[in-house]
Amino acid sequence: MQTLYRRLLRFMPRLGLQVTDLGPGAAVVSRRGGPYEVTDGPAGTKLLSRPGRRLRVTGLDKDTWLLRRAEDDGTGAAARGKPGPATKGVVPLGDTGALLLIEDPEGLDERKMQLSAAEYLCVQHVTAMLGLYGVNCVFDVGANTGQYAKRLRRAGYTGRIVSFEPTSETFARLSKAAEKDPEWRVYQCGLGREETTAEIHKSWLTMNSLLPPSDYGKGRYSRFAKSDTEEIRIRRLDEVMDEAMEGLADPVPYLKMDTQGYDLEVFAGAGKRAGEFAGMQSEVACLRLYEGSPTMGESVAVYEAEGFGITGMYPVTREATTGRVIEFDCVMMRAEAAPEPPAKP
């Protein structure tokens, strides 16, 4: 004898409803799209898919699986929905509990993967340092269209950001990006050693610079072959700090610089107020793209002399043919600015 439950399931299609029977005591009722195909999933689960749309299940660890739409590969694994063993495309990151999923390990571009990972890790590290040191104002010098500020926001930083970008066309895009964020302020100027005006090379995409390209730079980037220039205003960092941090009861600033070979000039403009920054970030060069720009060793020596210590180095660009790093993002913090650890009981 049919139960009331089974009789009700048989009646529902007359009402225009689709019924997918999952077994004793379980069914899926839908208005459209069904009935679904049902396959056995991991750990006693059921997998529902539209007819003809197979699911591939990849075991990430003993309690985690990844479901993807896939055609049957001939082994029946996709159709069955059975979790296979973790593949070489699933990489545990030490004992952190994090897993790196690589869709196509065989076709992986190692250099691109390394640089993308470095960018992600750099933002995560910086955000952690901002939290640890209680930073509430980030000076974003060489902001371009706001890429760095957007990464910080996505990573969870909610404090003030003050971005500096000198060229008019790029500044317009930066201003647009920041207009709905009340704690993101923008200034149309460059920063340097002295108050002045100067000609900046532009039309180099994200690499506008006050310095001309070196022979090495010209050989690496065809964009350096020709450029437009624009006259810009340059201010000193120590002269704009009070205005930028206005309204913050207890400002704790952090300085990020990405000015295409001009970072030491920006830093010089901080003068004695460099000691107010809890930390900083500078793009330092192993191979010089610009004439007159400092080497990595020269830059780091200046920063260390002001009390900053390296907490992270992340490659920004690398030669595809030799593997040499061209530039690093160097993250440095002032250890004396770190909060006191809680007393042990």
Image (cartoon, rainbow, N blue to C red):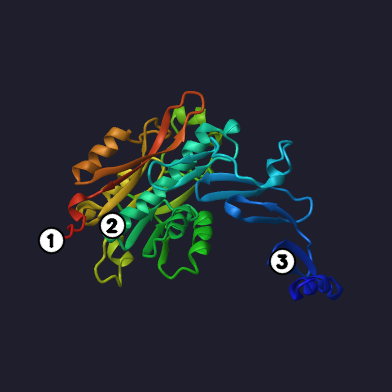
Question: In the image, which is nearer the foreground, mark 2 or mark 1?
Answer: 1
Residue 89 in which image quadrant: top right
Distance between mark 1 and mark 3 Cα atoms? 57 Å
Residue 104 in which image quadrant: top right
Q: According to the image, label 1 marks what residue?
A: 345
Q: According to the image, label 3 marks what residue?
A: 28
Mark 2 belongs to which amino acid? Leu
Distance between mark 2 and mark 3 Cα atoms? 49 Å
Q: Position of residue 332 (x, y in %)?
A: 28, 46
Q: According to the image, label 2 marks what residue?
A: 132
Residue 261 appears anywhere in the view: yes
- As drawn, which residue projects farthest toward the front? 1
Which element carries disc 3, helix, strand or loop?
Answer: strand
For marks 1 and 3, the one nearer the N-term is 3
24 and 75: which is toward the camera: 24
Q: Position of residue 130 (x, y in %)?
A: 32, 57
Q: Residues within 10 Å of mark 1 (few under 14, many from 20)?
A: few
Distance between mark 2 and mark 1 Cα atoms? 22 Å
Mark 3 belongs to which amino acid? Val
For marks 2 and 1, the one nearer the N-term is 2
Left or right placement of residue 322 versus residue 281 in this view? right
Who's the residue at 31% across and 59% down the image? 131
Q: Position of residue 148 (x, y in %)?
A: 44, 53
Mark 1 belongs to which amino acid? Pro
Q: Is residue 7 above or below residue 198?
A: below
Left or right placement of residue 232 versus residue 305 in this view? right
Residue 258 appears anywhere in the view: no
